[in-house]
Image (cartoon, rainbow, N blue to C red):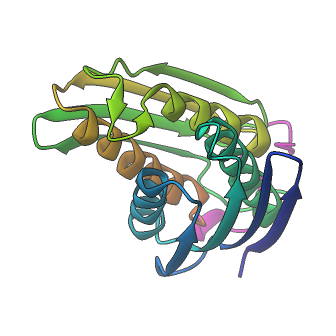
């Protein structure tokens, strides 16, 4: 089993996280931000990642530090759980619809951190959640995990649906990319013989 336990304690957030990248989608998530909890529950279920996460943060200011730091710690957990990335498929991509919204997502577990999006939300807030923070989450995840991620909005007029489509698609392409390639389970998927 590819697992990791991570903690991060700062003056802004205190985070404890356990990840099983070979799980079934079981999760327990409490970040103090209801919308982020919802997105991470979707992520866990659709990626079949077992995730236990608690965060206490300075949400009296806003959700920025919580969202960014959770993305950072979750990315670090994947980095640790995957080790040398031996046997992984490395790539994943898909189109995912969520009602009127449609997103294209592609990932490369490359060792090179990069986040590129075209997520323009029709409304700046979903409840009390600032939609700008969605890109902050994904960028922080990519920096810590050392992955390249592209998310492109093809259509969408509902901010909640668009965010949900992005998180579900990210979960599914990451699940595909971290899956073990049965006929190359002892091979690192790079001509350099290293990803990291």
**Relative to residue 168, is residue 107 drawn left or right?**
right
Instruction: Judge by depth and name the residue closer to the eye, 60 or 41.
Output: 60
Against 173, is 95 above or below? Answer: above
Instruction: Judge by depth and name the residue closer to the eye, 34 or 101.
Output: 34
Total number of numbered discs in the rendering: 0
The image quarter containing residue 181 is bottom right
- Whether the magenta-drawn stretch holds residue 194 is answered as yes
In which quadrant will I find the N terminus?
bottom right
Instruction: Judge by depth and name the residue closer to the eye, 167 or 39.
Output: 39
Q: Residue furthest left?
A: 100
- What percent of the width, then of the height, locates residue 53? 64, 69
Q: Residue at x 69, y 68 (%)?
A: 185
- What percent of the width, then of the height, locates residue 26? 49, 81
The image quarter containing residue 97 is top left
Magenta stretch prevailing secondary structure: loop
In which quadrant will I find the C terminus?
top right
Q: Residue at x 61, y 43 (%)?
A: 67
Q: Which residues are magenta?
A: 181-196
Q: Residue at x 48, y 67 (%)?
A: 44
**Relative to residue 121, is residue 91 drawn left or right?**
right
Instruction: Judge by depth and name the residue closer to the eye, 33 or 116.
Output: 33
**Relative to residue 107, is residue 113 drawn left or right?**
right
- What percent of the width, then of the height, locates residue 120? 35, 17
- What percent of the width, then of the height, locates residue 30? 57, 68
- Whether the magenta-drawn stretch holds residue 30 is answered as no
């Amino acid at each position: 089993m590819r697992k990791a336990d991570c903690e991060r304690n700062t003056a802004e957030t205190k985070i404890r996280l356990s990840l099983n990248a070979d799980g079934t989608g079981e999760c327990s998530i409490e970040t103090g931000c209801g919308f982020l909890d919802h997105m991470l529950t979707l992520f866990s279920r659709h990626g079949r990642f077992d995730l236990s996460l608690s965060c206490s943060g300075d949400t009296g200011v806003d959700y920025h530090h919580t969202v960014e730091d959770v993305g950072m710690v979750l990315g670090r957990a994947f980095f640790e759980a995957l080790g040398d990335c031996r046997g992984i498929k490395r790539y994943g991509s898909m189109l995912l619809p969520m009602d009127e919204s449609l997103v294209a997502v592609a990932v490369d577990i490359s060792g090179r951190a990069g986040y590129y999006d075209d997520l323009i939300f029709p409304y700046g807030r979903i409840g009390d959640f600032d939609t700008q923070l969605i890109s902050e989450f994904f960028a922080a995840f990519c920096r810590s995990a050392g992955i390249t991620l592209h998310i492109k909005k093809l259509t969408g007029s509902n901010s909640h649906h668009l965010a949900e489509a992005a998180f579900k698609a990210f979960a599914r392409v990451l699940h595909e990319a971290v899956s073990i390639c049965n006929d190359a389970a002892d091979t690192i998927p790079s001509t350099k013989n290293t990803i990291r």
